[in-house]
């Protein structure tokens, strides 16, 4: 049986203008964006309690972060919770605003 070896989008790139290729890449990148998760009052209260417990007991946490239209996870121990500027600081120097945190898991 003779198998067709298709090159996919590569064969079309030579016939496309660079502006079109750029727009297609931007469109594909925007397609990967994630909307910011909305948390209700109960979830925010539970999140706050878990952060306080992890900070006072020096427990390692895994944070679910939404930043720049993307989701990612960060792990570490909480060095400081600054309520004045609403920022969480990890021991390795990273900092996250409270508004970007939408999930906490304690690693005991």
Image (cartoon, rainbow, N blue to C red):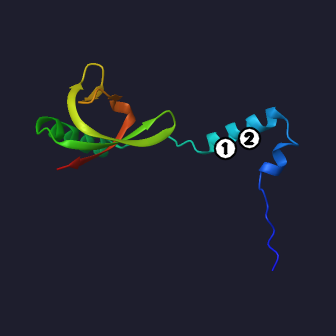
- Real-space Cα separation, disc 2 to disc 1, in angstroms: 6 Å
Please tell me whether mark 1 sits on a helix, a strand or a loop: helix
Report the residue that reaches farthest toward the bottom.
1
Report the residue that reaches farthest toward the top.
84
Residue 9 location (% of width, % of height) = 77, 51
Q: Nearer the viewer, residue 107 or 33?
A: 107
One can see residue 39 in this view:
yes
Residue 105 location (% of width, % of height) = 26, 48
Residue 79 location (% of width, % of height) = 20, 29
Residue 98 location (% of width, % of height) = 33, 31
Place residue 28 in its image quadrant.
Answer: top right
User: Up-down: is 16 above or below 11?
Assistant: above
Report the residue that reaches farthest toward the right.
15
Residue that carries the numbered disc 1 in the rendered image: 28
Place residue 43 in its image quadrant.
Answer: top left
Q: Nearer the viewer, residue 30 or 83?
A: 30
Q: Are marks 2 and 1 in contact (CB under 8 Å)?
A: yes
- Where does the N terminus fall, quadrant-wise? bottom right
Left or right: 57 as drawn, with respect to 1:
left
Residue that carries the numbered disc 2 in the rendered image: 24
Left or right: 61 as drawn, with respect to 97:
left
Left or right: 91 as drawn, with respect to 2:
left
Identified at 79% across, 64% down, the residue is 5
Left or right: 18 as drawn, with respect to 103:
right
Number of residues whose C-alpha sits closer than 10 Å to that of mark 1, classed few (under 14), some (14–19) or many (20 or more): few
Please tell me whether mark 2 sits on a helix, a strand or a loop: helix
Report the residue that reaches farthest toward the left.
57
Identified at 78% across, 56% down, the residue is 7
């Amino acid at each position: 049986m003779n198998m067709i070896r298709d090159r996919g989008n590569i064969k079309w790139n030579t016939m496309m203008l660079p502006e079109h290729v750029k727009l297609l890449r931007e469109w594909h990148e925007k397609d990967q964006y994630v909307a910011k998760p909305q948390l209700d009052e109960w979830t925010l209260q539970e999140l706050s309690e878990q952060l306080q417990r992890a900070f006072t007991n020096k427990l390692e946490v895994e944070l679910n972060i939404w930043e720049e239209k993307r989701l990612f996870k960060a792990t570490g121990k909480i060095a400081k919770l600054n309520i004045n500027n609403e920022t969480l600081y990890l021991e390795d120097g990273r900092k996250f605003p409270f508004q970007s945190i939408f999930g906490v898991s304690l690693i005991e």
